[in-house]
Image: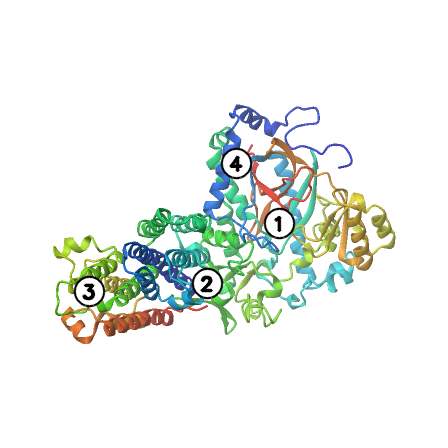
Amino acid sequence: MLGRTAQNLFWLSRYVERAENMARLLEVGYRMSLTSRREGGASEHLMSMLQAAEVDEEFAKKHKLADVTSVSQFMLFDETNPSSVRSCLLAARTNARTVRTALTTEMWESLNSAWLEFAAIDPRETTGSRLVELLQWVKTVSHRYRGALLSTFLRDDGYAFSQIGNFVERADNTARILDMKYYVLLPRTDLIGGDVDIQQWTLILRAASAHRSYRHVYHDRYKAWNIADYLILRPEMPRSLIFSVGWINRTLDMLEEIYGGKAAGHAAAADVTSMLEGNSMDRIFAYGLHEFLTEFIARNNKVTEALAESYNFYG
Amino acid sequence: MPGPSPFDEMTNADGSVREPYLILEQWLKEQPPQALGLMAADAEGIFRRLGITFAVYGSNEGTEKLIPFDIIPRIISAIEWRRLSKGIEQRVRALNAFLHDIYHRQEILKAGRVPEKLILNNSAFCPEMMGLEPARGIYSHIIGVDIVRVGPDDFYVLEDNLRTPSGVSYMLEDREAMLQLAPDLFQRYKVAPVETYPENLRRTMESVAPAGAGSSPTLAVLTPGIYNSAYFEHSFLADQMGAELCEGQDLFVENGKVYARTTMGPRRIDVIYRRIDDDFLDPLTFRPDSMLGVPGLFDAYRAGNVTLVNAPGTGIADDKAVYTYVPEIIEFYLGEKALLKNVPTYNCTDAEQRAYVLEHIAELVVKEVHGSGGYGMLVGPASTAEMHDIFRAKILARPDNYIVQPTLALSTCPTFVDAGIAPRHVDLRPYVLVGDQIRITPGGLTRVALTEGSLVVNSSQGGGTKDTWVLEE
């Protein structure tokens, strides 16, 4: 496989995953802004969401006020925002066009029709319930693509690069969501948590589609400690850090089998894994949650760099 | 349009239906009123979903467009096809022999059958190819011959495309669409398959692999990238024949050999179907500013370590000025009379012919010698007095830059348009593969000028396509 093809498959998956996560974040920001009763609260929630997506500075260049309209337009349609749903879907489709011969018809068609449908949307008609509907649709696009990938893609190196891209992006996103509100997750003396805390925790869980499954796992009310544990160390939680890293490792093993040998990606992934395996929330909190997440994001980025080096990504 | 009404592929002048179209006529009658409209809409949906699009140069709105697909097939009888394919085979044989000669001993120039100046001073002539011996002596492996019909037995070759003819993916996808849309019509006919093309392309490429390549040579399609108007076709063909789809940056040359940068390190490439023009192939040999090509590629080719399909320099054989000499070329190399006619062509550098052209420009077609895609072209009868003057001036300024031909009454074929079924002008581009043998796919791309009366079928000028059926005996 051409190095460029591998690179494209890797990034294609990342963009699709990112589009989904941007939709999740925006959905949460939108809900929070609706329910915030405090003066300026809506704007604060939306800003912290922009920070999590690391596009707050870009946003501030164009807009004075973060309200639902400006933020949703920016997150959905803005061409200058590299993480907007538009940018992600277009990049995914452009990547797909470039590596079309490496994709199945089902994968290509899911992205091509997603882009065509998205391009036909009038940005002015995406308020209120329409907005929620559109965000739901973005998630469906991602699920449709992954469904096509899982059920039609040959299990070879192309599949491996796609999966690694997917989970590197997911790990990154989950870490950012946690980091956005890390301070509400820190252990404190008042264990109960006020309404504001509950609201923030819900935000975090919702952004990871985890607010319902949390109950199945913990049979408990929302607790900061559990929430952090859930999104970092729980292997059964499909958006947790350890789950994502597990996939990265297994898929790298698959590449090792195909190519007959370990490469730099393994070492980089091992560095990430060592932060999670055998670790506990006690130790993570002792180390500092924010510091831990920052370190995680940096090491996770190194996986991409290592892959690029070992498998000839370029261009 | 002056003159009598043009030959119609389906209906004779007396209103009777030509034999190959009888079943189609019956089928059309059986279709409920809205059926064709629905089919046309379905067809558009199919093409859009598959992403069969092309980019229009100079158009800002929407970078990707669909070539309109017409749902009424163009049908060619077995007898007609046999005649055509014999004529095509003769042409490609002679033109490959011509290329070999031009890049070696130049006997045809020495014999004075083709003017030396026309070849050696031609920008399509590639001096770097002199003395080079391509695999099996073949220069043009993939050819699309543009043919028009003006009467039941009157076929003319308009152009021999020996460089990088495009459109074959439309031939294949048009067939796919037609099979989906009108399966019942297929059942009533015996239509020769075109689906063999990708496999035959693969065989053709394998058959011209360099000597050292082994039994299973590695094939690649070299594309300028996703912004090229024919990118869909490049990826489609690579996919269909299982070749690697590469851009220039994916390949590199080391010790005179070509390699692809793969996830497992360099991989040797044996045969390249390049969809990049000669000038951009190799910045070290041709245009130094080319970002599309592969530095050193031409040297690897010269050393016989890789085969380029088609060879550089094939343009000298489909140059519009050389075209006039093709009947001569066929006689010179094969000792045969040309089976397919050339369109009579006026040479504007000849004072007498130029005078005629300037006087009769309103009846003639003027083409730029190096133009393609219907750009820079004048169709006299369909144009204005003002445009006639502009082209008169152009011809006077650069007589060698234009060829002029009479306006041919291109045959028409029933076509589904807004107003219902109406005749529209068509041409035909059959595809030929030259390797261990000559393989002509039965069918080809029928292009149709969708505007009433228009003779310009190019997709860049609003033309559409039709599935082309060659009937089996």
C-alpha distance separating marks 3 and 2: 33 Å
| Circles 3 and 1: CB atoms closer than 8 Å | no
Mark 4 residue crowding within 10 angstroms, few (<14) / some (14–19) / many (20+): some
In this rendering, is residue A229 above or below B412? below
Going by the numbered disc 3, the residue's amino acid type is Ala
Q: Which chain does the residue under circle 1 lie in?
A: B
Mark 3 residue crowding within 10 angstroms, few (<14) / some (14–19) / many (20+): many
* Residue that numbered label 2 is attached to: A80
* Residue that numbered label 4 is attached to: B40
Near-viewer residue (A131 or B340): A131
C-alpha distance separating marks 3 and 1: 58 Å
* Residue that numbered label 3 is attached to: A228
| Circles 4 and 3: CB atoms closer than 8 Å | no
Disc 4 and disc 2 on one polypeptide chain:
no
Work out whether residue B264 can be spotted. no
Please provide percent x and percent y for residue A243: 22, 61
- Of label 3 and label 2, which has the lower sequence position? 2
Going by the numbered disc 4, the residue's amino acid type is Ala
Q: Write down the quadrant of residue B4 in the picture.
A: top right
Badge 4 element? helix
Disc 4 and disc 3 on one polypeptide chain:
no
Query: For the point 60% across and 70% down, which residue is it?
Result: B289
Disc 3 and disc 1 on one polypeptide chain:
no
Please provide percent x and percent y for residue B277: 60, 61
Q: Say left or right for B197 vs A268.
A: right
Near-viewer residue (B221 or B299): B221
Mark 1 residue crowding within 10 angstroms, few (<14) / some (14–19) / many (20+): some
